[in-house]
Image (cartoon, rainbow, N blue to C red):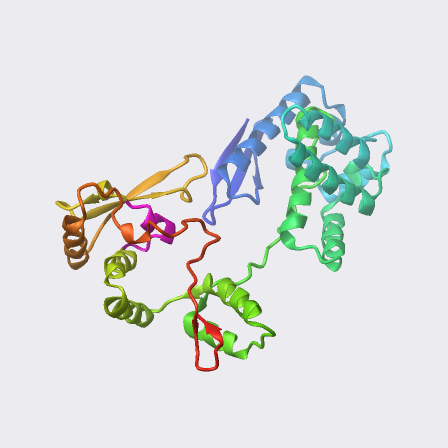
Amino acid sequence: MAYLRRRSGGRFSLLIYWKGKKHQKGLCTTDSTDATQIKLDVEEQLRRIRSGESPKAAQLLDEGFSIVDVLFGCPEIDKRLASDPEANPLTLRELSDAYLEYQLPTVGPDERYNSTARFKKLCEFFGDDRRVMTITESALTAYHAHRSEEGLNGTSVRKEFGSLKAAITWAVRTGKFPQSPISEWPQIKVRRLKRFEWKSDIDRMIAAQSFESDDERRAYLKEMSARIVLTASDMRDLIDLARREQSDLVVPLMSVCATGMRRKEMVQLRKEDFDPQRGTLMISSRKQSRTEDVTTRTVVLPRHVADAVKDHFERLPARERMLFPVFSQIDRSYNNRWVEYEFDAQGQPRL
């Protein structure tokens, strides 16, 4: 039998009871789904050992190897398997072809194309005739270094490892391998590029740029506008500007500051989403869930914001459906980032 136990760091340990003794194996994953799948795979391997379907595993146990070493591998076992041509003759090319054929009824053409391309890169590095059981953690580290030298980022390498891991897991589950040759897969950390900047920093970046034409400058400003993060002082200046130039924007800006909702969520608010009695907004979003098309959340507005929205709400025409009709003429798509330009004394466009 095998049982899962979560450790203090969030990772799991697998407790294996074999012939009256308890054995423990630390797992690298913090995902309960992955840990459960590993547990099920281990239980299947234990069943095969008990039933005599894995004679090699039984032989290793008789020679004194622990059940954890037999299930998850160790350097000595890996060397023995690699040196035994009859142990697991399945090559990387044969594994990829068999796994892609298994995937054929369940995946679309795009995913199949991507999987084929990933296996092609793996076979180019390791060789078509490389036996899968001889691929170790150090070999994967060398592959990662090789692909990095080619300019590939960590996300792409992680996907290639994911395809190989999925194929090996399938092979173990179907009995082609007694266990995975790789006990711990390399942890590939992806460096995320900083996207957002303070407005003052973006202003300095714009000033430091040189542009050959107004069109080039506008394209750069449009891209940088999506990265602006406004400080509290910037927001106060923006609301003061709205009071002087376009008073219809004051209440929407106050609502954004009070709730943190997105632009698209703000322009899609309907009159029925505001409860004047409770002072709440019901905000709909398509970005909060992978399983539901639209999710909603109810946000309680501060008293002064709720009073301002209520006054605005009561002045709207009875036939008006939108809470902020000032945005009804604006394209709500993300590509239209609502960038407006003005020209300075030299005739140069600026945000």
Q: Is residue 76 left or right of residue 12?
A: right
Residue occupying image coordinates x 83% and y 39%: 130
Q: Quadrant of residue 192?
A: bottom right
Quarter of the image where the C terminus is located: bottom left
Q: Is residue 23 visible?
A: yes
- Residues drawn in magenta: 259-269
Residue occupying image coordinates x 70% and y 55%: 152
Quarter of the image where the N terminus is located: top right
- Most foreground residue, 177 or 17: 177
Was residue 97 drawn as part of the magenta stretch in this picture? Answer: no
Q: Is residue 258 left or right of residue 223?
A: left
Residue 81 image offset from top left, x and y in percent: 80, 36
Q: Quadrant of residue 339?
A: bottom left
- Most foreground residue, 260 or 154: 260
Q: Is residue 228 above or below residue 139?
A: below
Residue occupying image coordinates x 35% and y 48%: 265
Q: Is residue 21 visible?
A: no
Instruction: Report how many numbered discs are placed on residues in the image.
Output: 0
Outermost residue, bottom side: 345
Outermost residue, left side: 277
